[in-house]
Image (cartoon, rainbow, N blue to C red):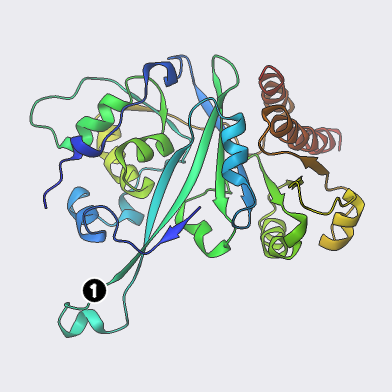
Amino acid sequence: MVSRISDTVTEPRSEDRLPASASSAVKIVIVGGFGVGKTTFVRSVSEIRPLTTEETMTQAGAGIDDIAGVERKSVTTVAMDFGRITLNDELVLYLFGTPGQQRFWFLWNGLFEGALGAIVLVDTRRLEVSFDVIGRLEEAEVPFVIAVNSFPDATSYLTEEVRGALDLPESVPIVVCDARERPSSRDVLISLMRYLRTFATTSEST
Amino acid sequence: MSTSDRDWDEGGPERLYVITGGRAESTEQADLDLVTLIVSQEEPKAGIQPELAAILRVCRSPVSVAEISAHLALPASVISVLLADLLADGRVEARMPASSRPDIALIEAVIDGLQNL
């Protein structure tokens, strides 16, 4: 079957176009385990319907290609949803909801390196899935805040219990949110930015 | 955020190899971030590779590399290879992202923008 690129291309809707003056962009990464609400979070604050970018992982069995090339390589598609907020005429913020499994992170070049920071979205029913993510962010020196997505049937944890369970220092902000609600998700983003501002202040005054 | 092992579109890596002319993605990519904004400088000419024409149309207004990837249904790594060609002869302009070590002014601008949501 032959496909034509014109069949698969969608163009941005005219109301989704950025102003011609948009001159630079920043990004924040939303990290969390499967089903924790990353896409919900992105959708609630994004001005566009979330889009998806995909990368493929190809795993070929060692030596198989050398023999005949008949063995099918296994191709895994990893998808990442993202949204956008136009902050002013020049500045645009992108939000990437990233798979929690750290082995997928390298698929997107510089995803974390260029990010302002990260939001670790956690579900108190499954806090343990966040350990690995938090460790990796600390290693990579990516500043982050914890956002507890308050699922209706989750035990209501105090943020300090979450801090203890995740073994986080006092300095890391922990906020409770409802990822379905725009004002709530927006407040999480503002919490991260205020946290970043404390670093910027500190580094200038020393 | 989902994973699947279904074949990507028309069969995966071979198609991507054809689109990029077989160039190694790691060496021929332009130095672009997912949020580098791309803006077309001209309309697609007749006979141009369809993927490049599609990029020029999508980028009539500023569009991030991630959005181009989503609109063309191609991986961002492939888009970066294609953009290297368009950038080399000035058919698109790249607007680089703000620094990852933000200053106070940038942080305040982000907070202001969010408060207006």
**Up-down relation of residue A186 to residue A89 (above or below):** below
Q: Which residue is mark 1?
A: A72
Residue sitting nearer the eye, A132 or A121: A121
Q: Residue at x 28, y 57 (%)?
A: B24
Q: Is residue B91 visible?
A: no
Q: Is B49 displayed left or right of B82 in the figure?
A: left
Q: Residue at x 11, y 49 (%)?
A: A2
Q: Secondary structure at mark 1?
A: loop
Q: Residue at x 54, y 25 (%)?
A: A47
Q: Amino acid at mark 1?
A: Arg
Residue sticking out furthest to the left: B47
Q: Is A123 displayed left or right of B60 in the figure?
A: right
Residue B50 lies in what quarter of the image? Answer: top left
Q: Residue at x 48, y 31 (%)?
A: A49
Residue sitting nearer the eye, A56 or B52: A56
Residue sticking out furthest to the front: A153
Q: Position of residue B3 (x, y in %)?
A: 45, 59
Q: Position of residue A109 (x, y in %)?
A: 47, 51
Numbered disc total: 1
Quarter of the image where the C terminus of chain A is located? top right
Residue sitting nearer the eye, A75 or B95: A75
**Up-down relation of residue B33 to residue B63 (above or below):** below
Q: Position of residue A52 (x, y in %)?
A: 43, 42
